[in-house]
Image (cartoon, grey):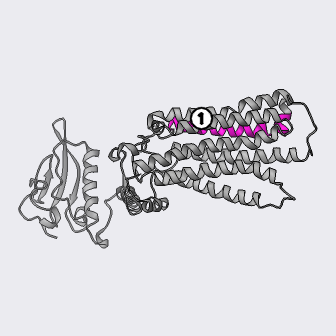
Amino acid sequence: MSSNSAFGSSSGLKGEQTSSRNTYQFKTSPTIPEEPINLETSSLNVNYETDGEDESISSYALANDSPFTKKGMLKSSLKSNYSYKQVDLMSHLRSKISAEDDKLPPELDDDLPGVETSLLHLPSKCAEQAEEFVKKVWAAGWNVAHHHTLPDWLKDNDFLLRGHRVPTNSFLACFKSIFRIHTETGNIWTHLLGMIAFLGIAAYFLTRPSIEIQWQEKAVFSAFFSGAILCLGFSWVFHTVYCHSERVGRFFNKLDYCGIALLTIGSFVPWLYYSFYCRLEPKVTYLALIFFLGTIAIVVSMWDKFAQPQYRPLRAGVFVALGLSGVIPAMHYVITDGFWHAINFAALGWLVLMATLYIVGAVIYAARIPERIFPGKFDIWFQSHQIFHVFVLAAAFVHYHGISEIANYRLTLGDCIAREFE
């Protein structure tokens, strides 16, 4: 191996011959000697300065079995413009030697004495390869962008930094993105799968023979099924086509908010119907109230500014208030029939659990937790909007279980006994 192949060009380290064995001492900013080096008789001393004193780190013979010879020596670009401490300089040397390692054939790829390969190569290489793999998958899947490069109408959450879809102006491209990885992937699939699940439940329930489930019960449950399917359907479609264009995104965003109101209305219909099964006046009153409040929520959702990021707390507040309106009929039932009766026969416990899930989900959505605490760490998975979707879906299933229980109880009582209106 020649001196040029071993050390590189003359722009690298500069040596100084100190003995008959051609020992070269390298200090803080030298270059390689131009004269040929005898690898059998030469050695390399690497020095550093500490408070004006020279201290030798180590001396390596330049024979064929030397680690420096096997590693292709030091690259010519290895220079030091500063006075290194021992550990810093050795780390610098090892990193340069490691960089040369990739260029060598396998038979020359040996480790430095006393330094394990895992310490030199594996951590950095694994991290680099993993990062490169993710980037390739991401790039192949979709043209994603950083938050600051997006147009204003796509900047909904400034704590999600990377992985955003760019405007497409193509519905086909938007729907293809369902099967790609980006910031909306989780939002799409949580409610798409939820909608499919409720379509299956509704189909099973509504196709049962009338001897099992009468048409009145099917009609009452249809209100809930319709609200759930429309809410989940509007949601996943909105998150799919959100990147199409500003006009399309705004339109489907309004449908998304309308779906939340429809789910709330549909959830109250069966509970009010069966809780006040034999009491027409409060049943009609509370049904009218929830339809009225739900209509107001839908009208507010049509306001263009309602979807803007700064109104996120307002959006959460509107739908939480709509849901909390159910406290009024619930308290009415507790007062007239008793707390334990409400728990055991009116599914009040399930109703409270449903409300809790909705409220907790809305708070997480409004606070943008956890991405607010760890910006850029939840760009793809476990962001606040996905958590909100999961809570909404869980609340819908909880409510379905609750209204099924109260319906079974009421239908076992037979016909209502005539009573005066309260």
Say whether residue 73 is magenta: no
Amino acid type indicated by mark 1: Ile
Residue assigned mark 1: 296
Q: Is residue 120 above or below residue 285?
A: below
Q: Is residue 346 above or below residue 13?
A: above
In-image side of 369 versus 168 (left or right):
right
**Observer-nearest of 113 and 418:** 418
What secondary structure do most residues of the magenta stretch adopt? helix
In-image side of 97 versus 396 (left or right):
left
In-image side of 220 versus 368 (left or right):
right
Quarter holding the N terminus? bottom left
Dot 1 falls on a residue whose secondary structure is helix
Q: Is residue 319 above or below residue 48?
A: above
Where, by quadrant of the figure, is residue 172 drawn? bottom left
Residue depicted at x 49% and y 51%? 239
**Observer-nearest of 328 and 397:** 328
**Observer-nearest of 82 and 236:** 236
Say whether residue 359 is magenta: yes
**Observer-nearest of 142 and 110:** 142
Residue 25 drawn at (x, y percent): 14, 52
Chain part drawn in magenta = 341-368
Where, by quadrant of the figure, is residue 182 drawn? bottom left
Residue depicted at x 71% and y 35%? 288
Quarter holding the C terminus? top right
Residue 210 drawn at (x, y percent): 84, 59
In-image side of 115 versus 50 (left or right):
right
Residue 13 drawn at (x, y percent): 13, 54
